[in-house]
Image (tube, grey):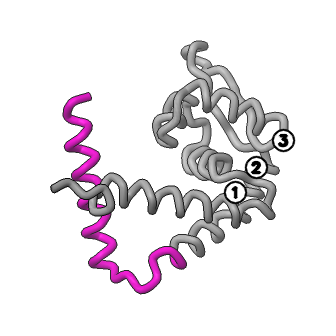
Amino acid sequence: MFDLNDCICFITNTASKKIIDEFNNRLENSGTTRVQWMALYFIGEKDGIIQKELSQKMNVQESSIARLMDRMEKENLCYRIRDVKDRRITRVRLTPLGETLREELLPFGQSFHNEATQNISQEELSIFKEVLNKMVRNLSKNN
């Protein structure tokens, strides 16, 4: 018989919510949200990232990224420029302030990861990631 408490979807949702809530709580003192932190990370990883690609990497809708970029531009963390070859494409770059904040927050991400995965072996983590990625691929086949 089906038991929701034993359902992998319910368990991963509960874990994800706990991780997100805790991450946001800890970021609160920096004045940054988890979503801004993710954007800073990905923009810094690929200078001049296309806004659409950023939305895909962050797994959020393009309209949500546009609003996020509006807020981050107002906070002088990033700026957008039109692509030279194709003006339909918008690229995003970090400002010096955004770069500084990103560098300050990168160790925070590593520290949080280390705490969340303490007492879990590298082998267990590898298997866990592999299983989750397989589930995503299984469910993506129909889309």
Tag 1's secondary structure? helix
Q: Amino acid at mark 3?
A: Glu
In contact (CB < 8 Å): disc 2 and disc 1? yes
In contact (CB < 8 Å): disc 2 and disc 3? no
Q: Which residue is mark 2?
A: 98
Q: Earlier in the sequence, mark 2 or mark 3?
A: 3
Q: Quadrant of the N terminus?
A: bottom left
Asked which quadrant contains residue 82, the reply is: top right
Tag 2's secondary structure? helix
Label 2 Cα crowd, 10 Å radius (few <14 / some 14-19 / many 20+): many
User: Looking at the picture, does residue 77 appear above or below residue 110?
Assistant: above
Bounds of the magenta segment: 114-143
Q: Which residue is mark 1?
A: 102
Q: Earlier in the sequence, mark 3 or mark 1?
A: 3
Asked which quadrant contains residue 125, the reply is: bottom left
Residue at screen point 65% across, 34% down: 92
Nearer the viewer's eye, disc 3 or disc 1?
A: 3
User: Looking at the picture, does residue 76 appear above or below residue 96?
Assistant: above
Label 3 Cα crowd, 10 Å radius (few <14 / some 14-19 / many 20+): few
Specify the principal SS of the magenta part.
helix
Label 1 Cα crowd, 10 Å radius (few <14 / some 14-19 / many 20+): many
- Residue 75: give its label: 3
> Nearest the camera: 18 or 33?
18
Q: Position of residue 31 (x, y in %)?
A: 80, 55
Asked which quadrant contains residue 13, the reply is: bottom left
